[in-house]
């Protein structure tokens, strides 16, 4: 059985008009540089990867906008939960992460995030080579112009994260690779995206509950990719545009997400 996505001209006009309205937003420009420009070389060292693991865990069930406690925590210099700090505290890493988050105040789920961070640190430390294999594969694609054939490899990379990293479902497994600047087609479908799609005529009603199912998530993801490709828009840029539409004031040089 096959499902065929049919996209009419009116739906294309809505998306094209929306993208045009957000094209000068700093977050959109930054996403183009980080995820699309083949001259740009993303930082995929262990330190950066560990930072992104934590930001994904932290942004689950918490606001991540520019004025949120989460944004302020992740923007700290030096970052209090940097890879070297966590390596120095790896024997009690769960407690170290929990205490650091609790002391900052305003961050939810500190204990849960501490436990998840402790388990996931193994994949960035002891089992680094397994993670690096996927990083290297995506990095090779990142040096090429976007190609729809890359969807299969990006999806496989998302499955690797979801299958091995604690606290990562369909959304955050894609958020992980996108934030690193390594993917263009597989994106995190969060509450902002679902609101936009529901408001603008997406043929199925979306909710966080239904999207927690990997098969349903990928069904929706395929439809969204088809709409974007019809408009010659990369899904990762659409994602940035939707995020930008909720964040009118965004620092020009901010690189948390």
Image (cartoon, grey):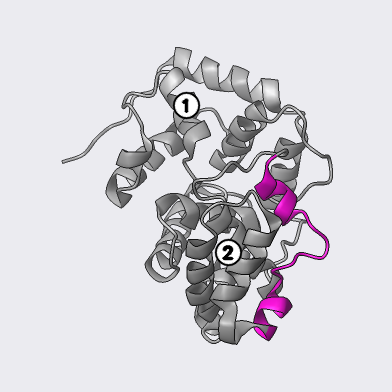
Magenta segment includes 77 = yes
Position in image of residue 185 (x %, y %): 51, 47
User: Against 210, is 59 above or below?
Assistant: below
| Residue interval drawn in magenta | 68-88
Q: Is mark 2 on a helix, strand or loop?
A: helix
Disc 1 crowd, CA 10 A, few/some/many (<14, 14-19, 20+): some
Instruction: Tell me the tag on residue 213.
Output: none
Task: Say which residue appears at 45% left-offset and 65% top-offset.
Answer: 161
Q: Label 1: which residue?
A: 195
Visible residue check, residue 211: yes
Disc 2 crowd, CA 10 A, few/some/many (<14, 14-19, 20+): many
Magenta segment includes 31 = no
For marks 2 and 1, give the CA distance: 26 Å
Image quadrant in which you'd find residue 221: top left
> 188 or 231: which is nearer to us?
188
Visible residue check, residue 124: no
Position in image of residue 139 (x %, y %): 62, 66
List the single residue furthest toward the top.
10
User: Against 36, is 88 above or below?
Assistant: below
Q: Give the side of residue 78 with respect to residue 239, left or right.
A: right
Instruction: Tell me the tag on residue 53.
Output: 2
First reached walking from the N terminus: tag 2 or tag 1: 2
Position in image of residue 2 (x %, y %): 21, 39
């Amino acid at each position: 059985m096959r499902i065929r996505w049919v996209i009419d001209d009116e739906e294309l006009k809505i998306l094209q008009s929306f993208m045009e309205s957000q094209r000068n937003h700093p977050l959109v420009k930054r996403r183009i540089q980080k995820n699309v420009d083949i001259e740009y070389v993303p930082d995929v060292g262990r330190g950066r990867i560990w930072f992104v693991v934590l930001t994904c865990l932290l942004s689950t069930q918490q606001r991540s906008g520019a004025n949120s406690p989460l944004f302020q925590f992740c923007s700290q210099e030096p970052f209090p939960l940097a890879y070297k700090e966590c390596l120095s505290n790896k024997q009690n890493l769960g407690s170290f992460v929990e205490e650091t988050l609790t002391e900052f105040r305003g961050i939810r789920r500190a204990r849960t995030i501490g436990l998840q961070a402790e388990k996931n640190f193994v994949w960035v430390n002891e089992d680094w080579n397994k993670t690096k294999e996927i990083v290297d594969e995506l990095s090779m694609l990142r040096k090429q112009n976007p190609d729809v054939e890359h969807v299969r490899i990006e999806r496989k990379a998302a499955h690797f994260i979801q299958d091995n990293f604690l606290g990562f479902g369909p959304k955050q497994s894609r958020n992980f690779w996108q934030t690193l600047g390594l993917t263009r087609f597989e994106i995190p479908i969060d509450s902002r995206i679902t609101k936009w799609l529901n408001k603008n005529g997406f043929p199925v009603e979306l909710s966080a509950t239904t999207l927690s199912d990997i098969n349903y998530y990928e069904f929706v993801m395929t439809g969204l990719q088809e709409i974007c490709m019809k408009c010659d828009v990369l899904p990762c840029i659409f994602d940035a545009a939707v995020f930008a539409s909720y964040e009118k004031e965004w620092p020009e040089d901010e690189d948390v997400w």
